[in-house]
Image (spheres, grey):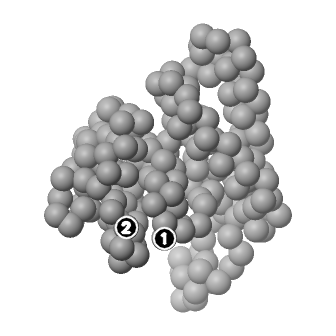
Amino acid sequence: MGAMEELAEPGKQTEVAELEEWVALIDACIEPIATRPVDLTDPDWMRKLKEGPRPLDEAGIRPETEATLRDVLSRYEEGDEDVRAALRALLERCHCFASATTLPFEPTPQGFRQRLVEMSVEDQGRDTRDMMVGLNGLCEQARDAGLDIRPLLLDVAELSSEVDKYGMGSTRGILLRAAEREPSGLW
């Protein structure tokens, strides 16, 4: 029995199980696209990769996928620690969904917080360094937009995992370190 089925409340189980089915279905749709080999011997491989369609667009499922991500984020924010842990585990299993799906950054407090919640539920993804570079860039964009990011970093840190997955600190710890810096951010 997985973490999703271990949730205590039956209503919560049903809602999260339905969400798990959607995420897994989307993950299966984009997996062949997202994991397609890239010919690194082609001198134009980088340009082709950048200019080519994104996996969600190529699969024709961007609206559905973004709506599903919004649902994941909403349940993550509203849920207790068991729900948040189950959603983190879901995105770890469905890594194509997690890596191909993000919502556009809006330079507002809510937009910054939304991107932080995405980072929290992704829980460092497959590489802490990528998460840290992304967080630093996001903090820079938010500061450039004049946002007070420290309270938002602290707020989302409270939702985040305390597990040090790759030896570089937990997601909670990374967000707290970013909040402690002046200006806020990792470096």
Q: Can residue 40 be seen in this snapshot? A: yes
The picture places residue 44, in percent across and down from the top left corner, at 58, 88
- Mark found first going from the N terminus, 2 or 1: 1
Q: Position of residue 69 (x, y in %)?
A: 65, 49
Dot label at residue 135: none
Residue 46 locus on image (x, y percent): 54, 82
Q: Report if residue 42 is visible in the image.
A: no
State whether residue 40 is above or below residue 1.
below
At horizontal 44% and vertical 44% (from top left) the residue drawn is 120
The x and y percentages for residue 109 are 45, 60
Mark 1 residue type? Pro
User: Which residue occupies 54% across, 68% down?
Assistant: 106
Question: How far is disc 2 from disc 1 in space, using C-alphas?
Answer: 8 Å
Image quarter of the N terminus: top right
Towards the viewer: 137 or 21: 137
The one nearer the camera, 34 or 36, is: 34
Q: Determine the image quadrant of residue 130.
A: bottom left
Q: Please give the residue where the numbered disc 2 appears in the rendered image.
A: 147
Instruction: Say what amino acid the circle numbered 2 marks.
Output: Leu
Q: Which residue is drawn at 61% across and 35% down?
A: 75
Q: Nearer the viewer, residue 186 or 94?
A: 186
Mark 1 — residue?
107
| Residue shown at 60% from the left, 61% from the top | 103
Answer with left or right where residue 59 lies relative to residue 99: right
Q: Which residue sits furthest right? A: 60
Label 2 with label 1: CB-CB less than 8 Å:
yes
- Dot 1: within a 10 Å radius of its alpha carbon, few (fewer than 14), some, or many (20 or more) residues? some
Disc 1 secondary structure class? loop
